[in-house]
Amino acid sequence: MARGALVAKNGLKTRGLTLAELLVVIVILGILGSLAMPRLFPQKEKAVVGEAISTLHAIRMGEKSYHADTGNFLTLGALDNNATWNQIGIDNPGSARFTYAVDATSGQVTATRTGNNVPQRYHGTTIVLVLENGSWDEASSTHPLAPKN
């Protein structure tokens, strides 16, 4: 009997897959899936953006509190020390993923994607939140996963 051939009840030979062939197909599909998944589902970047959104809201709330006390917003940058950021009630939120800044003249809080392990398509992109009403500035935001109003 030929290798891989099976005999059906009616006596005819049928061809099936061997275990080795089946395993090779599964390995190939696994490799193709692992290559395609990061491109199809940028879940890690969505989580990182979620962290930035939360931080932007915290900065906005601190700025609103500062505005209630002083009547104006405070301009803050990524290079400012914690003592400067503490005026709005938080430490400098800059991380290995984003740098944050507040521009009091434009009334915007900005998170800029930075870091050594940032995918090239996201590096240097920004998410912008309007201080006054908490809406997202879609025209100024360049990050593809930035929230929409």
Image: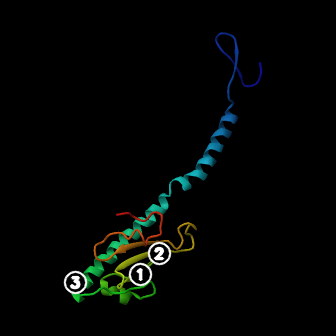
Residue hosting label 3: 68
Residue type, numbered disc 1: Ala
Judging by the rendered image, the residue that carries numbered circle 2 is 112
* Location of residue 126 in the rendering, given as x and y in whole percent from the top left corner: 46, 72
**Looking at the picture, which amino acid does disc 3 mark?**
Ala
Label 3 neighbour load within 10 Å: few <14, some 14-19, many 20+:
few
Q: Which residue is mark 1?
A: 101
Q: Is residue 106 left or right of residue 24?
A: left
* Tag 2: amino acid: Thr
Instruction: Give residue 3's quadrant in the image.
Output: top right
Query: Does dot 1 land on a helix, a strand or a loop?
Result: strand
Please name whichever residue, 88 or 3, is drawn nearer the observer in this view of the structure: 88
Work out how far the residue at label 2 is from the one at label 3, CA to CA, in angstroms.
27 Å
- Asked if the residue at tag 3 contacts the one at tag 2, i.e. Cβ–Cβ closer than 8 Å, the answer is no
| Residue situated furthest front in the rendering | 139
Asked if the residue at tag 1 contacts the one at tag 2, i.e. Cβ–Cβ closer than 8 Å, the answer is yes
Q: Residue at x 53, y 53 (%)?
A: 40
Question: Cβ–Cβ below 8 Å for labels 1 and 3?
Answer: no
Q: Residue 7 shows which numbered tag? A: none
x 29%, y 80%: residue: 62
